[in-house]
Image: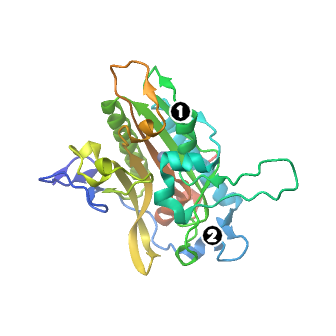
Amino acid sequence: MMINSNKTTRQFNTIPWQEGIVLQESNKVRSNFNNFSERLLFQKKIIDHYLGKKSGMFLILPKGQKLLNALISLLKDEIGKQFNFQEYSLPKMINQQICEQAKISGQWDYYLLSTKSHRSTKGERNTLTLDPLQCTPFYKYLENKKLNNLPLRIFDVSGPTYRNEDKNALTPLIKQLEFRRLEFIYFDQPQGVVNIREQVLTKLEKVSQALNIPFRRVIGSGCYEMTSEILRKPAKTLDTIPIIDLEMKLTKPYKKRNKKLDYLEVVGASVLQDQQTNRFNIKPKNPQQKLWSGCVGVGLNRFMYAFLSNNGFDENKWPKLIKKYLD
Ligand SMILES: [Zn+2]
């Protein structure tokens, strides 16, 4: 074990690859609340039910929206601005062809939701899929393009993504049909992509610490269907592990399939090598260079949950860093 300022790094003899293995954890972060319960999200008017308790959809009420806006501003400022990510609004619908090209279909079939036209206008008749991942439309946009001025760094926070979760797995702010994320997407030469993920993850850990939320890094599972080469074989170094999740500790465990879990996966951070750029034929302008890509998705509803679990509902007692962004 190696201990540096705010976290403990585990040492491994061989590069670990199995999902769930803990790589690092915070060691000095203390939460600031110990009375959290899911019911308080409703009693304290953060969110409310919509279309019944089993719909998986919720309204965010003004008090919750204020917190959500503050978290978004914080991420835009502390990460977006600091590391030169440009903001885009990406479409939230994709078609069957993009699903197949991105190889979403294999992995996410069960969770996809689609539109159905009502045929009363001369509009779109094809079925479109509600995007479950958020970065796919950007790969489509860059298809067959040659990129210069690397790195290319963008983010999107323009709307919800959708997954048709099992009714009995639904949990407010944690597992919903419709949820919000901020997605950072980056393209660069291999070492550049590795460095950007590390910069963003390290900064997110600092943010987590400043918000009194204990955290840990674990090996995660991918969004896109991974080729055997990229996910099923161990990475050559720790920093090329394809998916690293940042989990935040809760003051009250939540239930997932009858298991009680203390840590909540809030961030998924990927180094996808040239897998997605190949699938969309995206190349660097300079033929001598190699192009990799990756993304860091921050689950905003989950971030709210982890924040409230560790800081409670009284704004006056919230940490300085969030107060700075509350209007
Ligand atoms: Zn992504």
Name the amino acid type tagged 1.
Answer: Glu
Q: Residue at x 32, y 32 (%)?
A: 190
Element class at badge 2: loop
Give the left or right position of residue 161, taking residue 280 as reference. right
Mark 1 residue element: loop
- Residue visible at 55% across and 50% down in the picture: 99
* Number of callouts: 2
| Tag nearer the camera, 2 or 1 | 1
**Quarter-of-image position of residue 112:** bottom right
Query: How are the residues colored?
Result: rainbow
Question: What distance separates the C-alpha of mark 2 from that of mark 1?
Answer: 34 Å
User: In the rendered image, which residue does mark 1 sit on?
Assistant: 143
Which of 35 and 104 lies nearest the eye of the viewer?
Answer: 104
Q: Percent x, y for residue 252? A: 44, 73
Q: Which amino acid does label 2 sit on?
A: Gly
Q: How crowded is mark 1: few (under 14 residues within 10 Å), some or many (20 or more)?
A: some
Q: In this view, does 279 lie above or below 26?
A: above
The answer to whether mark 1 is within 8 Å of ligand 1 is no
Q: Is residue 323 visible?
A: no
Q: Residue 266 at what x, y percent from top left?
A: 45, 57
Up the image or down, 156 lies above or below 172; here it is above
The disc, 2 or 1, on the residue closer to the chain's N-terminal end is: 2
Q: Which of 291 and 7 is in front in this view?
A: 291
* Residue ID at (73%, 72%): 51
**Is 125 rendered above or below residue 190?**
below
For the view shown, which residue lies furthest in the right direction?
120
Residue beneath disc 2: 56
Q: Can residue 99 be seen in this view?
A: yes
Residue that sits furthest to the bottom in the current view: 258
Residue 75 position, x and y percent, is: 51, 43
Which image quadrant for residue 263?
A: bottom left
